[in-house]
Amino acid sequence: MTLLRISSLLLIVIILCTVISDLQPIKGYTSNSELIITELMPNPVGADEVGEWLEIENFSNSEVNLQDWLLEDLSLPEVRIAAQEIIILARDISVIKSLNPGINNQIVLTNFVFINSGTTIKLTRKDHLQQSIFTYSEAQAGKSFELMRGNCEKIEMNLQGDTIGKANTQCPENLTPTAPITATDITAAPQIVIFRVNPNPSSDSEWLELKNFSTSAVDLNNWYIKDSSENGSKYTIKNQVLSGNSYLQIFPQGISLNNEGDTLYLFNANSEAIDIFHYEKTDKGTILGAASVVTPVPSISLTSKEINLVQTTVTTYSHLAIPKIYRLKLQE
């Protein structure tokens, strides 16, 4: 084999590796793509053929021409997108403007159709060197799916509606409480709470999330979680330290997060009840947020020590309206 042929083969390999690496999706988007799909509305309130829209952001430091890209197999018009600019692709511009009178973004008329049951949408540069991939689950009327801001790399349904033309919702670890917290709230409410629960995920496994509201790290080794089942099963946390103002996502084994509603109990290593999270029947893909204390406590398989602690916890915390303290801070 001649030196020229070896050099040619090496060049081909390098080109192929570059293309493949440039197209690797990371949980809904590609980190090296100039244009990224940041939000879409697949199931608007009203007719889909006029209310659907898609949001694209130019994450590069230079102008990008939308005409150089394809939305699936759909050609796009010539639109100059400035660096860091957000534009909106819509099936009916007048409807989007009438529903969102405050937005000043470019709105581009585009003939696309979204599936309400969920799918993957791809925005691909015509040279196939860059691609933004956006995957969403079954849609609810009037609720968009958005790529959350921050480092979590998540696409979530916006349960409040949408953020069209605005900054997307922050990742949970980037949230900063805005509502005031009094000294009484800090001392009375638990520092570690069951913060969010996903009992009926669109994909993957059930999960829950703990949050440490204090500024100090907490050793969670041998803390455990129980549900309202009668079999006494529990999930024990091992070798985890939760830093101050931080979150921990858990995929609990051995307990089931019932889709029809359930009550979850968080105990520390001394079997002291720390938090209680109650939820009702939940739809597929819905993430439930913030701590919820309920009374009366359902009859579940607990030791007599645990039952006394749970009852004491409910008596102590129920008058503080813990769900309102934390949930309102997230929504403001």
Image (cartoon, rainbow, N blue to C red):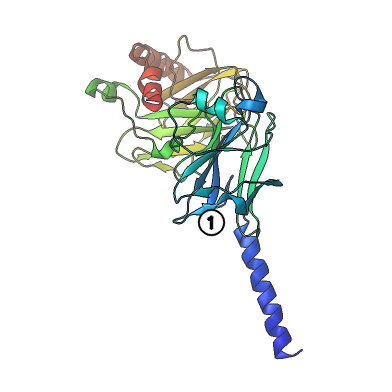
Relative image position of residue 310 (x, y in whole percent): 43, 17
Residue at figure coordinates x 41%, y 28% from the top left? 193
Relative image position of residue 62 (x, y in whole percent): 46, 56
| Position of the C terminus by quadrant | top left
Type of amino acid at the residue the image marks with label 1: Asn
Residue at figure coordinates x 52%, y 29% from the top left? 158
**Residue 256 makes an appearance in the image:** no
Instruction: Name the side, left or right, on which 43 lies relative to 263.
Output: right
Asked where in the image residue 200 lies, by quadrant, the reply is top right
Residue 314, above or below 193 = above
Residue at figure coordinates x 55%, y 16% from the top left? 300
Nearer to me, 149 or 66: 66
Instruction: Name the side, left or right, on which 319 lies relative to 41.
Output: left
View extreme (left): residue: 183
- Crowding at dot 1, Cα within 10 Å, few <14 / some 14-19 / many 20+, comes out as some
Asked where in the image residue 308 lies, by quadrant, the reply is top left
Label 1 sits on a secondary structure element that is loop
Relative image position of residue 198 (x, y in whole percent): 56, 29
Instruction: Name the side, left or right, on which 227 lies relative to 127.
Output: left
View extreme (top): residue: 296
Residue at figure coordinates x 35%, y 16% from the top left? 317
Residue hosting label 1: 32
Residue 117, above or below 46 = below
